[in-house]
């Protein structure tokens, strides 16, 4: 709280603010960052292993193995969410589990599981993409903008 706002508080409110600041639990930011880094790194390591599997056993190239790898990671995260395992991973790793593509799969399936009692169409179908819908929308929109810019630059001979 800034000093200007603090001056407008009554003495009792200022005393309460001081007490609150003393009793507030300090968050272990560095520890949380390390946990997120490790969790995200392990997810990426698993993704790399899946990509190498597709390259060596299904004759994909580095360029073409990305899409099935992403699909597989999303499928695995959805399965783990359904069995309640991904929640524990997310509780430990925080943003490290939310930032990779597995966080997208978790967001989609969590909403579907939460609203399944409302029925297939209105519950699961209507709520599945509420959280993930904005990711899809802005992902498609930004891809459109970048493609438009690239097309204009190519037409002008810039690339």
Image (spheres, rainbow, N blue to C red):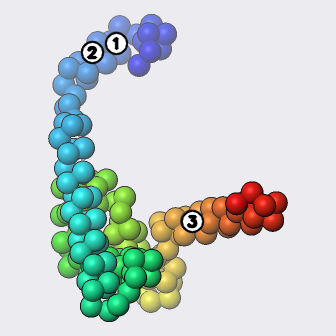
Mark 2 surroundings: few (<14), some (14-19) or many (≥20) residues within 10 A = few
Mark 3 surroundings: few (<14), some (14-19) or many (≥20) residues within 10 A = few
Mark 1 surroundings: few (<14), some (14-19) or many (≥20) residues within 10 A = some
Q: Position of residue 10 (x, y in %)?
A: 40, 10
Question: Mark on residue 144?
Answer: none
Place residue 101 in its image quadrant: bottom left
Give the left or right position of residue 150, taking residue 132 as reference.
right
Place residue 74 in its image quadrant: bottom left
Label 1, secondary structure: give it. Answer: helix
Q: Position of residue 103 (x, y in %)?
A: 35, 65
Residue at 20 percent across and 73 percent down: it is 84
Give the left or right position of residue 118, taking residue 57 as reference.
right
Task: Give the mark, 3 or 1, whose residue is nearer the N terminus.
Answer: 1
Residue closer to the observer: 148 or 31? 148
Is there a contact, CB below 8 Å, between mark 1 and mark 2?
A: yes
In this picture, is 1 found above or below 8? below
In this picture, is 72 found above or below 18? below
Identify the residue position indicated by label 3 in the image: 139
Residue at 78 percent across and 61 percent down: it is 157
């Amino acid at each position: 709280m800034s000093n200007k706002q603090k001056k407008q508080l009554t003495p009792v409110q200022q005393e309460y603010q001081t007490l609150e600041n003393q009793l507030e639990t300090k968050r272990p930011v560095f520890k949380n960052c390390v946990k997120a880094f490790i969790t995200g790194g392990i997810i990426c390591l698993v993704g790399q292993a899946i990509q190498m599997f597709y390259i060596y056993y299904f004759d994909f190239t580095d360029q073409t193995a990305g899409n099935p790898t992403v699909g597989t990671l999303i499928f695995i995260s959805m399965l783990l969410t359904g069995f309640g395992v991904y929640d524990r991973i997310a509780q430990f790793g925080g943003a490290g589990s939310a930032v990779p593509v597995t966080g997208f799969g978790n967001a989609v399936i969590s909403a579907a599981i939460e609203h399944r009692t409302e029925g297939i169409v209105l519950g699961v179908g209507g709520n599945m993409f509420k959280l993930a819908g904005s990711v899809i929308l802005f992902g498609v929109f930004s891809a459109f903008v970048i493609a438009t810019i690239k097309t204009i630059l190519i037409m002008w001979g810039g690339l």
